[in-house]
Image: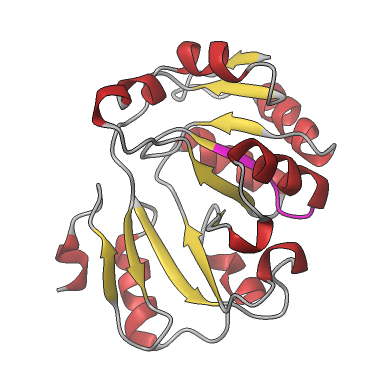
Amino acid sequence: MLLRVNDKNIPGGTIAQIVNCLKNGGIIIYPTDTVYALGCDITQARAIERICKLKNIKPEKSNFSFVCSNLSHLSEYTRAIPNHVFRVMKKALPGPYTFILEANNNVPKLLKHNKKTVGIRVPDNSICKAIVEALGNPLISTSLHNTSDDILEYFSDPETIYRQYQDEVDMVVDGGFGNIYVSTVLDCSNNEIIVVREGLGPLDVLD
């Protein structure tokens, strides 16, 4: 299903339809403030497995992000965050950043295995925010971005994405053309902030 959503006027019934899909184990492709992403409900293990199969990766080897609507979910999935890191997060989020933090024992076992970190995102995108707020818990998310420069635009067009993935996902949420740049990744898991990848988010948040 291709579901078109106007980010300036988001119908509650449309968000309820998306959330119902997620709560029933569905996987969706949806807009963020960077590229379009694959997502599912963090509580739906079968849906996580479906995304892993689609991306041809093992769950324990995955680098999924937890997409939140705000910072209120942090304590549910991460260990205590140092004050200097939290200040940067409050400055940067919502925005095109992924913060790698120490994971706690609430991270789904399917994903955790021997991993001790988790990536947290709070995208600055009204559709994404509305979905996660209505769902009531984070989305497990992974980017549709491909590193091959000649097909970057492919992942920004929701109709093209739908033609490619309509038989593999339950819903494509069309929020208009997406960005072609990925998030800036900051590793904060060892008490200092290390730039892992410079993406759309400027580094002056670290100043």
Residue sitting farthest toward the right: 24
Q: Quadrant of residue 186?
A: bottom left
Against 6, is 110 above or below?
Answer: below
Q: Position of residue 159 (x, y in %)?
A: 49, 11
Q: Residue at x 39, y 45 (%)?
A: 124
Residue 203 appears anywhere in the view: yes
Q: Residue at x 59, y 61 (%)?
A: 61
Residue 155 is a magenta residue: no
Q: Which stretch appears magenta? A: 38-43
- Is 50 on the left or on the right of 88, as rendered? right
Q: Position of residue 78 (x, y in %)?
A: 58, 77
- Is 165 on the left or on the right of 7, as rendered? right
Against 14, is 65 above or below?
Answer: below
Q: Residue at x 46, y 54 (%)?
A: 122
Residue 40 is a magenta residue: yes
The front one of 141 and 18 is 141
Against 71, is 59 above or below?
Answer: above
Residue 44 appears anywhere in the view: no
The front one of 196 and 34 is 196
- Is 79 on the left or on the right of 87, as rendered? right
